[in-house]
Image (cartoon, coloured by chain):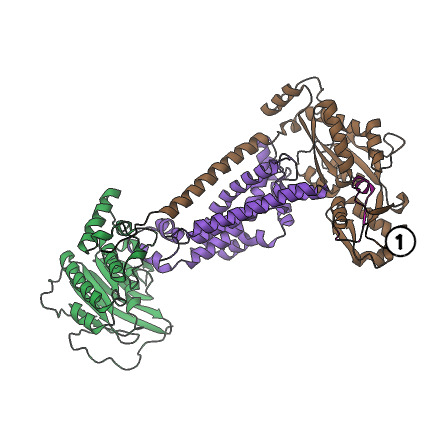
């Protein structure tokens, strides 16, 4: 049995989780704390990947990053290969679809932090970035972990965006969900069921790990 | 003082480690993506490279060329879903003859043509309809001289083994015991369009329209029916022949719809194009014709009867 | 505006620059509260019923909210001026604050909580300073403990140490002992008096407890319901005026 899709999926989801976590948590903090013009628009745009059908989202990304787009052409002239239909494109697809889930969960967690802790931190002279790094984000820790885990699960499970942007090329861009789909299409029910079971197993392991992690004392209470 | 529980930053440490590990894995994945992605650097280079000459290539392609002579190690073929059984067999034959592995991506012709146009690294695009090949050529990513119609697809009406009613032709679908009828999405799948044309020319489209369910492509439509989620399917004969699962089928007359011109085009240039042309030649060869015939395709008597070169 | 007259015997002499001069209005719901305070050395008690705006006064002085009119000057330096929109951030006002809930960071141990508030020095120096402050508040044995494991009284000791760690010009305490039992409260009042005497920091404490006000006050400011004219008052307190005399905003 060919296990390439499993390794590809794990690597793509891990990369995508890092990007989605960094961008998602930063955006969540800005949206939770900031008051600036265009905030509502930013919030709406950041949530677009949740409401758009994945294939539509994938299509827009393909048009934006494809070989005929300015970005795609610039990428090709620098790296000598197209951006789309590569594992890098799969990482982009998974990041874009995972980021809003990190953002939403993280934002709720950040907003749930008692602002009096932040005020207390200001009275002892901590500058705003240290208030964020040493007070708000640690106190929101459980929610952040939950958000990142949700993002990982979403990245691991993405089908629609990935299939549009990275295609379904066995051995190159065929991630687990796409491999499951392809096996079903090919009438290979055995492969489809084995891959599905593995994917479901990973999801359960991630959830258990997250539960354990967020139960560690010292996080998220006063 | 009573006994105290010292606080250790276990939680932050765990989070930090998780990030470090993810970062590491992430970077390795990016590195891997650079390694595993075959370059398309040749795409923009000279158009007619003689097969015997090794042209200037990106390093990893040079390595592939050295290892296998003038042949590339792997050929990427985008094929319409109806071609899956026949092309997988042809792919195995090609690998045996040339030691070039053929990797297939199957889907609806419309979706695959969009991928090719937007930069997917396929070397051959094999459509179930000539129109999508023309789109690809017009977009400047297909080699017009390699466009070839090598077979005509047949439509079949398939019903599962549990079906009580005997079926003779498409008109049987008027019976409302066929509660759901699976076809491919006519918007971007040629077999879906042919199915709609067949129902229209048989004057029963209005009777069945509300019972149609769409698959993403023709094999998706077939899977909807074989998995018990539809009571009949109008799909390609090739898939029905390839997957003997106890159902029954009748072949739809070719005149019932516009011809499903199975047309391919080479969508790559340079050194890879010679391998791609070799695969295209195999499809049209006597061996290729035998394989296609096995899966129910009609073959043109003339090698390229409908290749009108626009 | 008037300043509270020293009433407690033995209060330190007034320095040339008062630690706090403030006269401002803040809107609180339907009322506009008018505050005028000028501190003298020692402990100034803000006394009055709940909801009279005492906490709001401290928050405005600390820079946690902006006054709608007026100015705040700490140690001779203007830190807020509503007419020009000038607003010095809380971080840069150098005030120490003790809240009713200690608000110690739950994910850091006691020493870290105090050391974070020390404004100068290397990491080791800041930790040494934290240990010195912990000793001063009688909490030496708690340095490694998690705040969540402490009693309420212990937490407020740590909160006091933290508030003093930045060597503030002004110490603000908002009902700091109201959640504690009677005995602990008495102990901590004594501790507070000692600390203020030792450090000489000008202190404003909000309370609605008559005993506490009586025991701690060098000076007293009495709040009526939602507006305050600062009243010089020794004991006994004047009767609280009936009703609310707040202006409506706008």
Residue C136, given in percent of the width and then of the height, sits at 17, 54
Locate the C terminus of chain C and report the quarter of the image it occupies.
bottom left
Mark 1 — residue? Answer: B171
Q: Is residue A41 left or right of residue B202?
A: left
Chain that appears purple: A
Chain that appears green: C
Colour in which chain B is shown? brown
Which segment did they paint magenta? B228-245
The residue lying toward the viewer, choosing from C78 and C227, is C227
Residue C224, given in percent of the width and then of the height, sits at 27, 76
Quadrant in which residue A82 is drawn: top right
- Looking at the image, which residue sits at the far bottom? C242
The residue lying toward the viewer, choosing from B75 and C90, is B75
Do we see residue A93 in this rendering? yes
The 10 Å Cα crowd at callout 1, few under 14, some 14 to 19, many 20 or more, is some
Q: Is residue A122 left or right of residue A20?
A: left
């Amino acid at each position: 049995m060919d296990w390439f899709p499993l390794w590809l999926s794990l690597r793509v989801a891990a990369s995508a989780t890092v990007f989605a976590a960094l961008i998602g948590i930063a955006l969540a903090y800005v949206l939770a704390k900031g008051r600036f013009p265009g905030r509502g628009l930013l919030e709406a745009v950041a949530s677009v990947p949740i409401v758009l059908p994945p294939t539509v989202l994938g299509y827009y990304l393909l048009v934006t990053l494809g070989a005929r787009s300015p970005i795609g052409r610039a990428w090709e002239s620098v790296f000598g290969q197209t951006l789309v239909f590569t594992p890098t494109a799969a990482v982009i697809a998974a990041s874009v679809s995972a980021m809003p889930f990190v953002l939403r969960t993280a934002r709720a967690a950040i907003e749930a932090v008692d602002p009096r802790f932040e005020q207390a931190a200001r009275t002892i002279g901590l500058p705003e970035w240290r208030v964020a790094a040493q007070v708000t984000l640690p106190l929101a820790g459980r929610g952040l972990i939950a958000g990142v885990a949700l993002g990982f699960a979403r990245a691991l499970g993405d089908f629609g965006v990935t299939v549009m942007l990275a295609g379904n090329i066995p051995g190159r861009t065929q991630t687990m969900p796409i491999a499951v789909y392809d096996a079903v299409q090919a009438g290979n029910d055995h492969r489809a069921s084995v891959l599905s079971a593995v994917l479901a197993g990973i999801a359960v392991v991630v959830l258990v790990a997250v539960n354990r992690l967020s139960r560690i004392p010292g996080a998220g209470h006063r | 003082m009573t006994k105290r529980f010292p606080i250790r930053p276990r939680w932050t440490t765990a989070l930090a480690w998780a990030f470090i590990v993810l970062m590491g894995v992430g970077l390795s994945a990016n590195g891997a993506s650079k390694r595993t992605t075959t370059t398309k650097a040749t795409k923009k280079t000279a158009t007619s490279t003689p097969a015997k000459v090794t042209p200037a290539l990106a390093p990893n392609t040079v390595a592939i060329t050295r290892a296998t002579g003038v042949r590339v190690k792997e050929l990427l073929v985008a094929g319409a879903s109806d071609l899956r059984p026949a092309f997988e067999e042809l792919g195995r034959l090609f690998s045996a003859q040339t030691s070039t592995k053929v990797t297939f991506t199957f889907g609806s012709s419309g979706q695959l043509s969009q991928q090719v146009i937007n930069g997917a690294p396929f070397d051959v695009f094999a459509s179930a309809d000539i129109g999508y090949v023309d789109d690809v050529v017009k977009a400047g990513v297909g080699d017009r001289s390699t466009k070839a119609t090598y077979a005509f697809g047949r439509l079949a009406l398939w019903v599962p083994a549990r079906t009580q009613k005997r079926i003779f032709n498409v008109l049987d679908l008027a019976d409302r015991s066929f509660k759901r009828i699976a076809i491919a999405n006519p918007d971007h799948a040629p077999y879906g369009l042919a199915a709609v044309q067949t129902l229209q020319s048989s004057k029963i489209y209005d009777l069945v329209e509300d019972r149609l369910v769409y698959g993403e492509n023709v094999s998706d439509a077939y899977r909807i029916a074989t998995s018990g989620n539809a009571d009949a399917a109008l799909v390609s004969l090739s898939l029905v022949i390839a997957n003997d699962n106890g159902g029954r089928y009748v072949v739809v007359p070719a005149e019932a719809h516009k011809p499903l011109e199975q047309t391919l085009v080479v969508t790559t240039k340079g050194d890879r194009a010679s391998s791609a042309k070799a695969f295209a030649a195999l499809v049209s060869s006597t061996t290729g014709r035998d394989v296609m015939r096995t899966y129910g395709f009609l073959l043109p008597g003339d090698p390229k009867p409908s290749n009108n070169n626009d | 505006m008037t300043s509270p007259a020293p009433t407690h015997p033995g209060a330190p002499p007034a320095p040339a620059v008062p630690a706090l001069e403030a006269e401002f209005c803040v809107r609180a719901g339907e009322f506009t509260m008018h505050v005028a305070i000028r501190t003298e050395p020692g402990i100034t008690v803000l006394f009055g019923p709940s909801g009279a705006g005492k906490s709001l006064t401290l928050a405005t002085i600390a820079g946690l909210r902006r006054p709608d009119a007026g100015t705040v000057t700490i140690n001779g330096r203007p830190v807020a001026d509503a007419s020009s929109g000038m607003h010095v951030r809380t971080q840069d006002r150098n005030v120490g604050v003790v809240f009713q809930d200690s608000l110690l960071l739950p994910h850091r141990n006691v020493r870290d909580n105090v050391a974070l508030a020390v404004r100068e020095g290397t990491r080791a120096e800041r930790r040494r300073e934290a240990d010195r402050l912990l000793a001063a508040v009688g909490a030496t044995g708690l340095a490694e403990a998690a705040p969540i494991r402490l009693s309420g009284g212990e937490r407020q000791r740590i909160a006091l140490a933290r508030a003093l760690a930045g060597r503030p010009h002004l110490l603000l305490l908002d009902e700091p002992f109201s959640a504690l039992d009677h005995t602990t409260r008495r102990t901590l009042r004594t501790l507070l008096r000692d600390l203020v005497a030792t450090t000489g920091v000008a202190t404003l404490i909000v309370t609605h407890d008559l005993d506490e006000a009586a025991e701690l006050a060098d000076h007293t400011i009495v709040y009526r319901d939602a507006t305050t004219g600062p009243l010089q008052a020794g004991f006994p307190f004047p009767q609280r005026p009936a009703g609310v005399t707040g202006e409506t905003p706008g």
